[in-house]
Image (cartoon, rainbow, N blue to C red):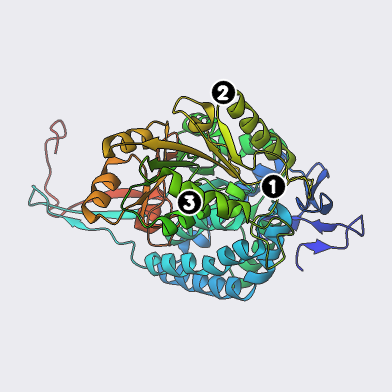
Amino acid sequence: MSGKDTGETAALTHCRMWIGGEWREAVSGDRFETADPYTGLAWASVPDAGAADVDAAVRAAERAQYGEWGRTSGFERARLMHRLADLLERDAGALAEIETRDNGKLLREMRGQTEYLPAWLRYFAGVADKLQGEVIPSDRPNFMVYTRHEPVGVVGAIVPWNSPLMLLMWKLAPLLAAGCTLVVKPSEHTPVSALEFARLVDEAGFPPGVFNVVTGQRAELGRALVEHPGVRHVAFTGSPAVGVKVAQSAAAHFARTTLELGGKSAQLVFPDADLDAAASGVIAGIFAATGQTCVAGSRLVVHREVHDALLERVVDRTRRIVLGDPTAPGTEMGPLANPAQFRTVTGFVERAVAEGARVLTGGRPAPDLGGLFYEPTVLTEVTPGMEVARQEIFGPVLSVLAFDTEDEAVALANATDFGLGAGVWTNDVRRAHRVAHAVRAGNVWVNSYRVVAPNVPFGGTGASGWGRESGLDAVREYTETKAVWIELTGEKRDPFRLG
C-alpha cells in the first residue's frame, strides 16, 4: 500500500506521513510504535514528528488553499468528494480492520462506522456547490449589497483514539465543502487509519496539500499545530482540560475553534417506559464501544417505581456480555484502548466504592482475559456528589441514581458541567417533549440512544464544548461571511460623513 513498506523491522508495518502530496519521514528521523490493545503487541511503526513537520504541513496546506484548491469551484469540490466517497466505500472493510487493530474496539462497530462515512462526504458534496450568499436590500439607493461565504483557510484538526476516522470525517467533509484545507494530527494511539485514508484522498485526485497528516507522540506536536499562525481554525475532539488549552492557544493568534469535548450523559427512564427497550438502550449507551465514547450514557437516572425491575434487566444482560477478541463475530465488548485508560477506569471504580457506591456486577479487571479487559460494571447507591456521578470515565461503568418526580429527574440530569447527550425513555409524548426541552444537552434521544447522521448537528454545551459538527451548521464553522458594497452612481460624497 502507498506510504507503507516492509520497514526496518519485518514484523512491523512501516508508515510514513502524508504532507503536500508526498509520503515523508519526520525531519528528526524519529519513530514510535503503536500497539494492538488486544494482543499487547506493537504492529506498526510511525514517524514521531515535531514542530518542523507541522510547519511543513501547514505551509503545504497554505499553498493549496491560496493556489489550486482555492481556485476550485464548488462543483469541482463536490465531484472530488463523491469520488472519495466511492473509494472509501470500496475500502471500508480494510479501514475498519486497521481501526480495530489500533484501538481494540469491535470490528463490527468499526466496520459500521467506516461503511457509514461515505454518507458524510456525499451529503456535504451536495452543499459544496450551494454556498451562496444573498443580496441584502440597501437603505441607500446608490448601493447594492451582497454577501459571500468564503473558506476560513487552513484548518488544524486533532482527533482522539476512540473513533479516529469518524471523528476525522466529521471535520473533513464540511471543511472540504467550504473550500478549506486540513492538517490533521491523529492520536498517538491510533495513527495508522488516517495515513491509510490519505492514500484514498490522493487516489481521488485532490490537489497536493489539501489533506495532510502529521503523526507523533510528543505533546509539542499538538501545541505546534494549534499555535501555528497559518492555522485559521482548530477543530479539536478530546478532553475538556486539553480543550481549554487549545482554545486559549488558538485565541492567541485569533484562530477560531470547534471543541467537541467530553460528556457525562444521563439516560432518564420514567415509569411508563418500555423497560425491555430501555434496558437495551442503557446497555447500548454505556457498554457499546467499551464505554469509550463521548456520548456514553454513563448515568442511569431511573424512577424509583421501576428502579428494581429495570436494574434486574440491565444487570442480567450486563453479566451475559461476551468479552474477547474484537475481531470475532460473537464478541460484544473488547479491551480498553490503552494502559492509561485501563488505569483510569480502575481508579474511578475503586474510589466510587470507597465513597459508598455498591457494585451490582463487574467492578474489576476481567479475571479470565487479563490485559486491558475490564468487566462491564453497574454501580448503585450512587449520590449526585460522588466523583463517579460527575466526572467522565470513558469506560464501561454505569452509575445508577433514583428519582421520584419529573423535576427531580431533570435536575439530576443537569447536575453536571457537561451538556453533550441525554436519553429519555417514556411513552408519554408530552413528557418526552417537556424533558427533551428541559435537559441541558446538545443531543437528546427519545426511546433510543447513540444515533447520528450527516445532516443532523452534533455538539454540546458547557464542558462539552462549542460549535457543531455535521448538519448545515458545520459548514458555517469553516466559512467567513463577507459583505460587499457596490456604489452604483459614481457620485462624490462628503469624506467625513459615515455612509
Of the numbered discs 1 and 3, the one sitting upstream in the chain is: 3
Q: In the rendering, at what x and y percent does residue 146 appear? A: 22, 55
Which residue does the numbered mark 2 point to in the structure image?
355
Which numbered dot is residue 427? Answer: none
Q: Position of residue 176 (x, y in %)?
A: 48, 60
Residue 356, percent across and down?
Answer: 55, 25
Q: Are marks 2 and 3 in contact (CB under 8 Å)?
A: no
**How many angstroms separate mark 1 from mark 3 (CA)?**
22 Å
353 left or right, relative to 472: right
The answer to whether 413 appears left or right of 27 in the picture is left
Whole-percent x, y for residue 444 in the image? 36, 50
Question: What secondary structure is found at the residue carrying circle 1?
Answer: loop
- Disc 2 packing (10 Å; few <14; some 14–19; many ≥20): some
Residue type for callout 3 = Val
From the viewer's perspective, is the residue at label 1 or at label 3 nearer?
3
Which corner quadrant holds the N terminus?
bottom right
Q: Which of marks 2 and 3 is nearer the N terminus?
A: 3
The local secondary structure at tag 3 comes to: helix
Q: What residue type is labelled 1?
A: Ala
Where 190 falls versus 1 (above or below)? above
